[in-house]
Image (spheres, rainbow, N blue to C red):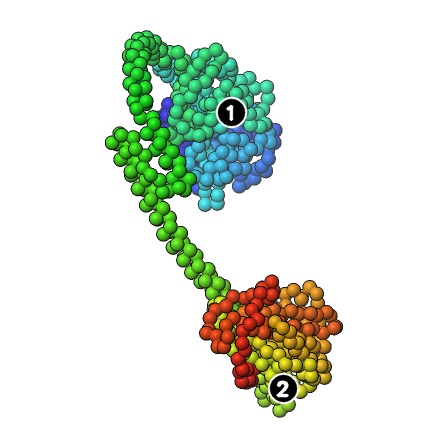
Amino acid sequence: MGASLRGIQDLTTLLAHQAREALATPHVPPAAERARYGVRRGAFVTLYGKDQSASFYSGVTKVGPEQIDRVWRLSQIDPALKGLTQANPLVSQAYFNGRDSYNRIYPYFDTWRQYAPNMRIPDYNFYYEADARHNPGRGPVWTETYLDPAGAGWMVSSIAPVYSPHGLEGVVGLDIPLKAMLQPIADMAVPWHGYAVLIGRDGTILTLPPQAERDFGITELGEHHYAGAVTRNIFKPARFNIRNRQDLQPLARALWAKTDATVRLRLGDRDMVVAHSHIAGTNWTLAIVAPASEIFADAVDLRTRLRRIGLMMAGALATFYILFLGFLYVRTKVLSEKLSRPLTDIGNTILKIGAGELDQPAPRSGVVELDAVSRSLVGMARGLSKAYATIAEQERHVSEALERERAITSAQRRFIDVVSHELRTPLTMIDSTAQILDRRAAKLAPDDVRDRAAIVRRAAARCENVLSSMLQLIRLGGLDGDRNLEIVAIDVAALLRDLAALAQERRPDHIFDTTQIGAAETEGDLEMLRTVFAAIIDNAARYSPPQSRIWIETHAEPRWCRVVIGDQGPGIPPDELSRIGHRFYRGDNSAGTGGAGLGLFMANELIGLHGGRLDIRSAPDRGTEVEVMLPVQRTGAGHREPGTLRSASSDDLGDKHETQTKESAAPLGPAPVVPI
């Protein structure tokens, strides 16, 4: 079957070649041939032609000289149409169908009587299944079973496209009647009283032999009596498609999955086995169907014999195992009585070790092997105890080192982010001013040049201000968490007066009131406290209007030195007050005011290192007061060696010792100012 179908496909390819050559070759047929043509029912057709080809130009195409020339050219393939039809007994018709609804077919019949006058040939499957969209490979293809409009009944066709340099010209085809294909399928010698069924690519049963009609519950289509012209595609009914049949779903799934496994079906009252194979060169499948009872008859007989033998062997084995298990039961009972107690002791020891009690004595049983296991178990537990201790210690060290590294890395990252952010704006101002000077240098007046220079100087001063803040933070240990204090006795009153005098020189447009500074002393790191108070005083002046008053007060208490610095600035909104003092934070009212947001943060950190506390009291339009609480004395008398101290919380302030002796105040020098 496969060889025959491939042979027909080769003949189709040959016919396509002949049609392509004919369309490319001008031809004027003899007068006898031309005389056969005329117009009937609006179509240009052949009127007679026994043992010749028939021609039909549908009325949907207006026939003119170009169309008639096309008919004369295609008349050259008449010998090929006749020869191919006579060469293969399966082929009943050979034809050419044009893109403009032209049909040339052998053998002859009255096309103007059979076809609809305005028949659109490209709408039929024997044309469009070979066009460019359905057949991009341009090779021969097979159609599904259809009702032939030419009056030959049910058939399938091998069709191939005919292309010219201008595109698709038409389709050639060889028709095989369904009854012609049925006989070879019915004659196939299938063992086990089986039969063959041919299935198309969409699941339609193409041929169904008589012996299969009962099982499938359908009757194969025979002769068709035409009541009129076929004006549309007519395919086999849906009951012939295995995809529409519930009883044939296993076969449909196997075909679509392209598996080679056999399929079991229940057809009517019989269990059937189906083997299937793809026919090369087509999209069809040949299915071999046979009764399961016939195929497995020998296997069923063998199974019966083997079952009988198996029952005999099972009886013998059952008797043996009953005796053997009885012996094992007696023997096991004796051994269990001897081993149960020591095993229980070992089990209890394991439970204790599992609960974390690793130091256990080794149970003794008198059985050499069990005693050896006990000793090994106890030794392992003691080794684990030592290993756990070592691992825990190592984990502690690693965790501490990791936390230190993480803190350093995080601080350094934040440092870089803030520096880059703070320097970007002044650098942009410097660059833009330089560009203006570069482009307009010749047009600028001296006053304009001085104004531009002032902008550059202010931007440079802001860069210097930011860098100064960052360097001060680094010197005070603000990036790696290591802060060392050099503790000395400090005259707080003298320190504050000097800082106020320096601030007055820098900002002569403000009034620094020191009249409320009284005697006050503390112990601490002089440089750090100078930085603290300088930052707070500078911050008060920075956010105060000109000619406003900034007051500095000290209050000596038995255990504390309290310093209050206030201003008459705009104050701090309540929603920002809780964030003031965070690293790099600046309030909304700081726009246009230099600073990096580090002053109060550093002040708060350094006051905490001294065991003190920093509080801020403020309200909008009512100014701000910063209160610093420092312990009068720290631990030990005299000079304190440098060391790292932790920050004290406000709850720790009541626990400071008051019995130390103060040293003389250290000399005061210029205080670094950290912009806030």
Q: Quadrant of the N terminus?
A: top left
Amino acid bearing label 2: Ala
What residue sits 72% from the left and 81% below the top? 548
SS assignment at label 2: helix
Q: Quadrant of the C terminus?
A: bottom right
Query: Residue 92 appears at what percent x and percent y?
Result: 44, 23
Question: Which residue, given by chain and number where applicable, does mark 1 sit on?
Answer: 243
Question: Quarter of the image holding residue 190?
Answer: top left
Q: Nearer the viewer, residue 597 or 651?
A: 651
SS assignment at label 1: helix
- Horizontal side of residue 497 vs 621, given as left or right: left
Which residue is farthest front? Answer: 659
Amino acid bearing label 1: Arg
Which residue is farthest right? Answer: 621
Q: Is residue 262 above or below residue 397?
A: above
Q: Is residue 348 above or below residue 149?
A: below
Q: Which mark is residue 501?
A: 2
